[in-house]
Amino acid sequence: MALIDTLRNAFSGRLLTESSDMAAFLTDWRGKWTGMALAVAQPDGTEDVAAIIRWCRQNQVAVVPQGGNTGLCGGATPSAEGRSLVLSLTRMNRVRAIDTSNNTITVEAGLTLQRVQEAARDAGRLFPLSLAAEGSCTIGGNLATNAGGVQVLRYGNARELCLGLEVVTADGRIWHGLKGLRKDNTGYDLRNLFIGSEGSLGVITAATLKLFPLPTTRIAAFVALSSLEAALALLALAQHHLGDGLTAFELMSDTCIGLVEKHVASARFPLSERASWYALIELSSMDDETTAGELMQTMLAQAMESGEVTDATIAASIAQARALWALREDMSEAQAAEGKTIKHDISLPISAIPEFVTSTNRAVVERFALARMVVFGHLGDGNLHYNVSPPEGFGADSADAFVAQEAAINLFVHDEVARRGGSVSAEHGLGVLRRDEAARYRDPTADALMNTLKSALDPLNLMNPGKVL
Ligand code: FAD
């Protein structure tokens, strides 16, 4: 029997083997990486996943878990040899349980983040993880990458929102760890080992997640800042005035907004004055709209009086709030439409950000002839998408000259980050994109421990080989 037929017999889900059927699973969202695979397996349930993994083990076939394929680091793309199996979890998309008294929801790994949010909302609760790819990315992918997004400031990243996991291990056993407990000190924390492991230790098949009270009011404000330092002062002021209600504090440069205006037809600049930097602030509240709006107004009035904010608008309707958020959320697409990009997903102590951005922006533009800084991110989390685009008017035919600088720019930027105690991957993970750079800056003992864990849990190196480590 041909190898692929033995796999077909091993589980009950769908198996894709035609290249036209597999194509969408073999290239990442940005079109940066393309691989080959023996097949794409789409299991229907956890037992199916376990059977597939046991088959992979018996036949020494590497497995590449995949969710929505929206990851930005090449982690879900198989290598070019074509000897691995893509394991797509998207058919495993059921809500298994909601417990509103315990404030938890248990879902299968292939459910999209948006559907998790909707299921929570239907039960009168909030699942706060939120990012621009939420209509396509899956909760399994979110946990495997420990995704962040726009509300980490208040609710934490995917890791902090997860109480329990169900995982198929590299030898095909099922770990039944779907506990909805907020306290559980019974040994090593396996859940946190699999979260953020990017499919390199096992396959997440289901998760029990934390739910929160659903805010009654959301107030979004878009403000022009007098300087980057003013952004920090405003963040502190917002934290002081809005407390736990401050659910997002996003920073973006005027260059970023310009790209969105250029490439997104519906985008409208909401202020009367331009500035070098803007912030998008969101207050989520249990108060009525008037009370919450007044709280935001009072905070912004104080910031204008002290000079941190030079202009501001508060969304007066849901449509206006959406339009303000679109300016931020359309940024990745606008940048992609502008052409090639050299991206960095860095984090720093928040206090170091103004000095880092000012001095590194200047140095990058001085050292590299073809560089325009496109900087935005989750300032409240110290996380910047510190990107470099070609200068305006740069012809697409010269894209190679721009891309040729990538390794040198990466090294320069990441050295600057490391020098200030930062991280070269804040929320996107490592995949293949940042694997070697992360190793360059990793503490040697941490590196040895990570390799020990990998060989203990996946001794045949079949789980997403070549990714992370
Ligand atoms: P995939 O891309 O399919 O996989 C990502 C990694 O997880 C791979 O290594 C894969 O092998 C592994 N994996 C997937 N599913 C499983 C599983 N069930 N078990 C084990 N391993 C698995 N990320 C952020 O953190 N914050 C943002 O604000 C953000 N914004 C984005 C905006 C856009 C427009 C886009 C395209 C992406 C953005 N991302 C962001 C990145 C991406 O959406 C996240 O990394 C997301 O968590 C990936 O989920 P996915 O289901 O698409 O995973």
Image (tube, rainbow, N blue to C red):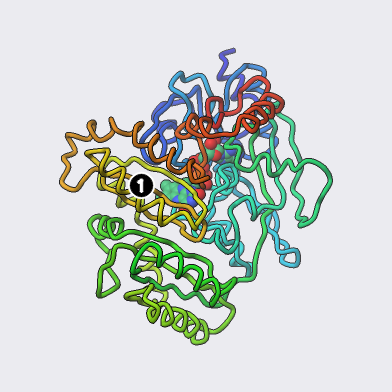
Q: Quadrant of residue 264?
A: bottom left
Quick one: quadrant of the N terminus?
top right
- Depth order, front residue of 282/107: 282
412 sits to left or right of 84: left
Image side of residue 62 versus residue 339, left or right: right
Residue at (70% x, 35% y) in the render: 47
Which image quadrant: the C terminus? Answer: top right
Q: Position of residue 141 (x, y in %)?
A: 55, 44
Residue 199 or residue 151, whichever sits in front: 151
Give the residue at mark 1: 360
Q: Please identify the quarter of the rendering in which residue 329 is found.
A: bottom left
Q: Is residue 310 left or right of residue 151?
A: left
Residue 382 x/y as whole percent: 49, 55
Q: Against 116, is 452 above or below?
A: above
Is residue 133 among the parts visible in the rendering? Answer: no
The kind of residue tagged 1 is: Thr
For image coordinates 23% across by 40% down, the residue present is 370
Which residue is at the front of the view, 105 or 302? 302
Residue 106 place in picture, x, y as percent: 68, 53
User: For residue 241, what is the image quadrant?
Assistant: bottom right
Q: Residue furthest top?
A: 1
Q: Please tell me whether mark 1 sits on a helix, a strand or a loop.
A: helix
Q: Residues within 10 Å of mark 1 (few under 14, many from 20)?
A: some
Query: Which residue shows up at 67% across the image and 59% down it?
Result: 210
